[in-house]
């Protein structure tokens, strides 16, 4: 098996992304975003990350529900074309230059298949793997890293999620304030 | 080479967010960029023949939690997985915020087309 | 928003209980098997979203009113900071795992072990589940007025 499964899944994801970007029907592009999410979840499974695979699938399903609610229940499912021609050509040229420059940066990274922490002798991941079970008592090392070694990051994530949900609720507030007041007794 | 395909995915999302006129297409482009970044971070921590970072019962040597050396040398990196786990849930929250802005704009202007919305220009 | 047909309602009322129990399992065993608070919280939210989609919005409002959901969300956030501050009081640093180091070191691979981590998983699962259910519910009950009368 080896590397070929990664190439097949990555090719599937790139083709689905191209279809999602270029098609004129909004329903088709939303379905292609769902295909990207499922392909990504399979990639995470083959990259030995089961927590992330579970999270990616359920988040993908909820994201599809939110996207379809916004687009399909309105009347507008066919869209007109792109912006004017000159702006599009300039953007494509600039993006292509960024892509070529970015490919040169990847030569400083190790190849795919040797992880970053094996070439750095004082990486913190060595401490996390060695002292994970004895320092925290949890068998799942990813949970130990999230909730014990790096719990500040989880606090930051909880506050960011809280803020964005409050923002979304406040923006959509006009009809739902009556509903909150009715059920508030 | 897999890194290059992941970077190509990021560029496709960036093209979609910059060039397209429909608001929902712009939101889809931002989501594709987020998927590409999460995938790239987890790919950095993988090495061939790795096992997932969950300790099995027979890999514990002593009663207070020492782990066998075969696991320590073969496990993949748990740190990028921890960071990507929170990033995926945050991307769902930001998708909800973006879609609520799109719905409000559609209610007020009647279209998803950003070149028809003329209030913010100049 | 009305509900769906009779077949969907019958099967939905059984499947949502299965999804809820599965979500509780993933949250509780987060320190032993893959999963944890975030994945389990999203699964808990999706069980109530299934209730809302299959039965309509009025039934979902009766089952779990929106004011209760927003209070659960805030309760989850406050409890998470409370656990951290207790760690400061008993252990000397913010977020220290005081239950595992001093008071209650269980044995590994048991359900009650690893100190603070199962409690944090439960609190995070509660918070994430309540937040995501609230935002999808409010997105569904939003009913716009007549569009397109403001274009110059």
Image (spheres, coloured by chain):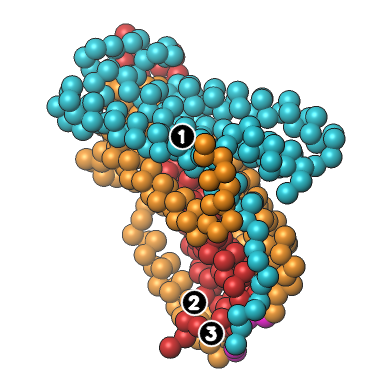
Which chain gets the orange colouring?
A: A
**Which residue is farthest left?**
C92
The residue that label 2 is drawn on is: A96
Question: Which residue position holds label 1?
Answer: C72
Q: Nearer the viewer, residue C66 or C15?
A: C66
Is residue A84 rendered magenta in the image? yes
Q: Label 1 vs label 3: CA separation? A: 41 Å
- What's the colour of chain B in the image? red
Span colored in magenta: A81-85
**Element marked by disc 1:** helix
Chain letter corresponding to the colour cyan: C
Residue at x-position 62% and y-position 70%: B106
The residue lying at 78 percent from left, 30 percent from top is C11
Residue B108 place in picture, x, y as percent:
59, 73
Residue that appears at 40% across and 23% down: C118
Instruction: Name the quadrant containing residue C53.
Output: top right
Tell me the crowding category of disc 2: few under 14, some 14 to 19, or many 20 or more residues within 10 angstroms, Cα based: some
What kind of secondary structure does the magenta stretch mostly adopt?
A: loop
In the drawing, what numbered circle is on residue B118?
3
Q: Nearer the viewer, residue C9 or C108?
A: C9
The span from disc 2 to disc 1 (Cα, nearest Å) is 48 Å
């Amino acid at each position: 098996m080896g590397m070929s499964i990664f190439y097949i899944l990555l090719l599937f994801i790139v083709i689905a992304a191209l279809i999602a970007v270029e098609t004129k029907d909004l329903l088709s592009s939303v379905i292609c975003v769902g295909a990207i999410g499922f392909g990504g979840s399979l990639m995470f499974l083959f990259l030995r990350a089961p927590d992330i695979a579970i999270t990616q699938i359920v988040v993908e399903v909820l994201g599809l529900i939110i996207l379809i609610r916004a687009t399909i229940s309105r009347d507008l499912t066919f869209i007109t074309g792109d912006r004017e021609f000159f702006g599009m050509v300039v953007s494509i040229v600039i993006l292509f230059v960024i892509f070529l420059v970015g490919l040169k940066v990847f030569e400083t990274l190790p190849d795919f298949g040797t992880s970053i922490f094996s070439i750095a002798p004082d990486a913190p991941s060595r401490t996390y793997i060695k002292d994970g079970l004895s320092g925290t008592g949890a068998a799942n090392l990813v949970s130990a890293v999230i909730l014990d070694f790096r719990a500040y990051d989880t606090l930051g994530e909880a506050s960011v999620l809280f803020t964005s949900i409050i923002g979304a609720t406040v923006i959509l507030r006009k009809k739902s304030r009556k509903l909150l007041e009715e059920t508030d007794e | 080479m897999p890194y290059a395909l992941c970077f190509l995915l990021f560029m496709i999302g960036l093209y979609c967010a910059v060039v397209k006129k429909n608001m929902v297409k712009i939101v889809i482009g931002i989501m594709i960029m987020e998927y590409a970044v999460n995938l790239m971070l987890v790919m950095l921590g993988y090495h061939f023949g790795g096992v997932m970072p969950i300790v099995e019962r027979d890999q514990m040597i002593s009663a207070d939690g020492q782990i066998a050396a075969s696991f320590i040398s073969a496990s993949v990196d748990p740190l990028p997985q921890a960071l990507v786990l929170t990033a995926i849930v945050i991307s769902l929250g930001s998708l909800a915020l973006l879609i609520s802005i799109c719905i409000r704009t559609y209610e007020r202007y009647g279209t998803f087309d950003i070149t028809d919305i003329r209030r913010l220009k100049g | 928003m009305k509900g769906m047909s009779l077949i969907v309602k019958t099967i939905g009322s059984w499947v949502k209980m299965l999804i809820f129990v599965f979500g509780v399992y993933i949250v509780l065993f987060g320190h032993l098997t893959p999963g944890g608070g975030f994945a389990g919280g999203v699964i808990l939210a999706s069980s109530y979203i299934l209730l809302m989609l299959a039965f309509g919005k009025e039934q979902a409002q009766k089952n779990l009113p929106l004011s209760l959901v927003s209070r659960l969300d805030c309760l989850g956030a406050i409890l998470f900071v409370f656990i951290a501050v207790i760690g400061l009081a008993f252990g000397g640093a913010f977020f220290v795992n005081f239950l595992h180091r001093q008071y209650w070191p269980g044995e590994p691979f048991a359900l009650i072990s690893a100190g603070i981590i199962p409690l944090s998983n439960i609190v995070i699962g509660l918070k994430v589940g309540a937040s995501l259910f609230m935002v999808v519910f409010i997105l569904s009950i939003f009913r716009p007025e007549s569009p397109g009368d403001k274009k110059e």
